[in-house]
Amino acid sequence: MRAYERLLKYVSYSTGSNPEATEVPSNPDEFIFARDLAAEMETLGFVDVHVDEHCYIRGTIPANIENYDGPVLGLIAHIDVSSAAAYTDIKPQVIHYTGGDLVQDAEKGYVVSRDDYPFLTRYEGMDIVTSDGTTLLGADDKAGVSEIMTLAEQLQADPAIKHGTIEVCFTPDEEIGRGSDFFDIDGFNADVAYTVDGEAFGEVQGETFNALSATVRINGFSIHPGSAKNMMKNACRIACEFDGLIPDSETPEHTEGYEGFYHLIEMKGDVERMDLDYIIRDHDFALAQSRAEHMHRIAEFLNSKYGDGTVEVDIEESYRNMIEIINEHPRLLELPIEILKEMDVEADTSPIRGGTDGATLSFKGLPCPNIGVGGHNFHGRKEFAVVQSMDSVVELLIRLVQAIAKEPKTL
């Protein structure tokens, strides 16, 4: 079975993670997919397959090299999908793309515009999996799951592919930042790992953002507006003033590459109190910290204007740039880059403008770069995956497990 065929099947499970839920997994349907996936794993040569109480699916592909004592490789993907767009009743379709706009539904006018997404041209003559335009597709990260499962199937079918021990884990709730919360690194037994959770085929990513979260509380004072002169302290207006002091050029809509940003993700409240939630992102931790310090300075300025205690800022660290750890294991990036070169593909090592479970796991002792799955436009109705790119990801993984097996244990 080819990877895309698994993807067509896997997207039928409605596994959108729920940021409002407190339990893990956040969506009970993740368990349905997990149990079916575990049953399939047992048919593909995995041993010690199990689904734990938090919906982590684990299994081992035993080494087929006699007396193997090399690195144990981990492969990780997540079974949930984003809830940023509709994720139920997904109707996938395979379209042979010949150029122009990628038409999802001609009658309703749902297209992936080549003008908006010029990278479409690189896929002319290939086959593309997308939805009917009313939902996301779920290639993030069911394409990664499909590719790992197809790797296992091909290893089982061809014992001439020599490989070491491979530990696989499929995680829940990655899309809401909880994918690594209950990840049992000690039980996983891998020395190094890769998340198969990037976008285009050829991505090999060892850098993430450093991530801080900022909670801003504005304490106002309400009084009847007819008698409010020199007495009312309108938290709504002060909140606008606070955000107005954030540099406009340092927001997501004005940044790219290595440029960091502040991002106001939610504000709620009334005259008496406003709560503002920000995220701060930068590949350079010192620059992320400087943004946090700037927010404290804004609070000091507004408190001098409106009175002590008017503005409170609380900053918390979410995750760090995993390059700090990956730099200690340079072969983890060199190996896939070398393999891609053998496949006549130039690796894209651009930094991730986001985070991965691998970032958190790296700082917990499991160095874990990220590999692209062959898809684009994640989290939205224009999401798609490329059939031939997914095949190439499987080929990359086959070559990678062989290469890792030849490396020293202390990779």
Image: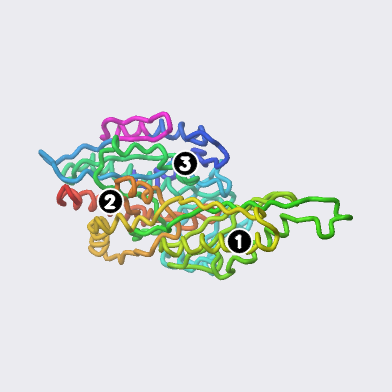
Assign the N terminus to one quadrant of the image: top left
Helix, strand or loop at mark 2:
helix
From the image, tell me which residue sits under label 2.
397
Q: Indicate the position of residue 386 as horizontal and vertical percent values.
A: 41, 56
The disc, 2 or 1, on the residue closer to the chain's N-terminal end is 1
Q: Is residue 401 magenta?
A: no
From the image, tell me which residue sits under label 3.
173
Q: Residues within 10 Å of mark 3 (few under 14, many from 20)?
A: many
Asked if marks 2 and 1 touch (Cβ < 8 Å), the reply is no
Which stretch did the figure color magenta?
A: 38-59
**Residue 266 seen in this snapshot:** no
Q: Indicate the position of residue 336 as horizontal and vertical percent values.
A: 26, 58
In the figure, is residue 393 to the left or right of 292?
left
- Taking 348 as reference, is 359 above or below it? above
Question: Residue flagged by tag 3: what amino acid is it?
Answer: Asp
| Quarter assignment of residue 236 | bottom right
The disc, 3 or 1, on the residue closer to the chain's N-terminal end is 3
